[in-house]
Image (spheres, rainbow, N blue to C red):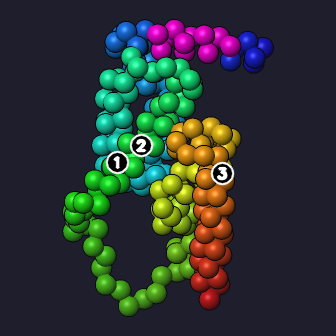
Amino acid sequence: MERRRDLERAVGEDRLVRRARRRDAAAFTELVRRYDAQLRDLAFHLLGDRDLIDDAMQELYVKAFRALPGFKGRASVGTWLYRLTYNACLDELRRSRRRPSPVSLEEIPEPSAATPDPAETLSGPDELRAALLEMPPDQRAAVWLVDAMGFDYTQAATIMATPVGTVASRLNRARTALRRTLASAELEMER
C-alpha cells in the first residue's frame, strides 16, 4: 500500500515537473509547496537567520523557476531543489559577510553583575544549534542532510556537488567538533 502511494506520488510529481518546465506557474507553485518546509529547514540550519533565509529562499525560487526548463532529470526534482537551496545559502552567506549587520537596541544586553544560571546557558537544542552555527557551512550542511534529514551519503554528495568521500570527511569533522563543543559546554555547566 505504501509502495503504491510512493509510486503515485512520483508519477504525480513527474507530471508537475513536466508542466512546470513549460512555465506552468500553478505546477511550479505546487512543487514549491511540496518542498518548501524541508528546503527552509535546510536553509535555517545553514544560515541561522530568518532574514537571510527569506532572501536565500526568494533567490532560490526565482532561479529554480528560470532553470526548470533546463532540468534534465538526472536526479529527482527534490534533490535538484536541495542543491539549489544549498547554493543559494552559500551565496547568501558570502553576501552577508560583505555587509555589516544592523544591531537594534533590543539586541544589546543590559550589563549584569550576576552570573547566569547554568540551566540557562545549556538549553539542549539551543546549545546544539549554536554549536552547529559555529561550524563551516559545508560541515553544517553535511550534518543536517545526513543526520537530520536522512539523506544517504550519495544523495548528500549530489546536493552538495562534492564527492561522497568529501561528505564523509566533512561529516566526521563536524561530528567530532559537535562532540567537543557540547562536552565542553556540559563541563562548564557542571562548574
- The question of residue 5 being in magenta is answered with no
Mark 3 nearby-residue class (10 Å; few <14, some 14–19, many ≥20) = few
Tell me residue 87's x, y (percent). 41, 43
Identify the residue at horizontal 42%, vertical 88% (top origin).
114
Identify the residue at horizontal 58%, vertical 51% (top origin).
142
- Residue 168's label in the rendered image is none
Residue type at the position of mark 1? Asp
Tell me residue 42's x, y (percent). 50, 44
Tell me if I can see residue 107 in this picture.
yes
Compared to 69, does 152 lie above or below? below
The span picked out in magenta is 7-18
Residue type at the position of mark 2? Asn
Name the residue carrying label 2. 87
Q: Give the CA distance from mark 3 to mark 1.
A: 24 Å
User: Which secondary structure, mark 3?
Assistant: helix
Name the residue carrying label 1. 91
Q: Earlier in the sequence, mark 2 or mark 3?
A: 2
Q: Earlier in the sequence, mark 3 or mark 1?
A: 1
Callouts 2 and 3 close, C-beta under 8 Å: no
Residue type at the position of mark 3? Gly
Tell me if I can see residue 145 in this picture.
no
Tell me residue 48's x, y (percent). 42, 55
Name the residue carrying label 3. 165
